[in-house]
Amino acid sequence: MALEAAFAKMNGLGNAIIVADMRGRADRVSPEAARALNADPATRFDQIMAIHDPRVAGTHNYIEILNSDGSQAQACGNGTRCVVQALAAETGQKVFTFQTVAGILNAEEHEDGLISVDMGKPRFGWQDIPLAEEFRDTRMIELQVGPIDAPVLHSPSVASMGNPHAIFWVEGDVSDYDLPRFGPLLENHPIFPERANISIAQVTADDALTLRTWERGAGLTRACGSAACAAAVSAARTGRTGRHVTVTVPGGPLDILWREDDHVIMTGPAEWEFSGRFDPASGAWERETEGAA
Ligand SMILES: N[C@@H](CCC[C@H](N)C(=O)O)C(=O)O
């Protein structure tokens, strides 16, 4: 069996990413391959970012995103930074335009190595999230977990960055909440017909919040870039913060700017770990380099 596609194991603030080079190929990374790669501790990941040849004029590549359960995702902020770093190292190019299911994304690697991604415009309509029933005000919807008379989490804001997010606001430390228990219940709640990424957020200043996320299709991760964007715009639209914030996730800080033109700009690092080759159909793989220094 030819392991004919290259990949790089990377991370974005600890969000485990596999960047798969599918350029020049007509096939796709299969959900079975994703689940097989995730089952191997050496290649366990949160998302696969599959780089394909461009499909529309004016873009460098089409990027397909798979979660570790094999489901397709529309957006992945941390993964997009990893793609930029990998392509910049290969080509010397610093500015990129990608097509994703969520739309056209522009991205740039800066001189200091940080990478900015224009994650596009947030969507707040209940049908855009999507929700299974109408909510006129998505800054706070009726959803809770825990005892009816004393809910543990309640009244989340919901937003889409091309993928669905619910953000529960808490006063205390986000690590004090049993997200591994509540996350899957909420991810699969019938109010979310496409499931949802579930975050707990604590506002710590007018320009800062901390965040912890149970990701749709991937579970508890050390960082979720699109969740950081969804939390930042939700904090601003509920009057909790301004439009330029630092969102600190377990893996570190992300800079999120909700521009006056409604675009959300996320800036943060990416890290290469090791490279290899794999079979996009089965997920069989072999390492080609040792790990990052
Ligand atoms: N970790 C990603 C989000 C990946 C997709 C998400 N799990 C979903 O299914 O929507 C990020 O950094 O945005």
Image: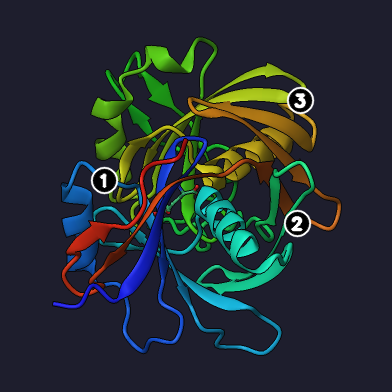
Q: Which amino acid does label 1 sit on?
A: Arg
In the depicted view, which residue is nearer to us: 279 or 27? 279
| Way the structure is coloured | rainbow
201 vs 16: above or below = above
Earlier-in-chain disc, 1 versus 2: 1
Q: What element carries label 3?
A: loop
Give me the residue at 35% from left, 19% from top: 151
Crowding at dot 2, Cα within 10 Å, few <14 / some 14-19 / many 20+, comes out as some
Q: What element carries label 2?
A: loop
Give me the residue at 16% from left, 70% from top: 282
Spatial CA span between label 3 and label 2: 18 Å
Q: Which amino acid does label 3 sit on?
A: Asp
Is residue 212 found left or right of 26 in the rendered image?
Answer: right
- Mark 1 highlights which residue? 44
The picture places residue 234, in percent across and down from the top left corner, at 64, 39
In the depicted view, which residue is nearer to us: 13 or 197? 13
- Mark 3 highlights which residue? 207
Q: Which amino acid does label 2 sit on?
A: His
Q: Which mark is residue 263?
A: 2
Label 1, ligand 1: CB separation under 8 Å: no
Q: What element carries label 1?
A: loop
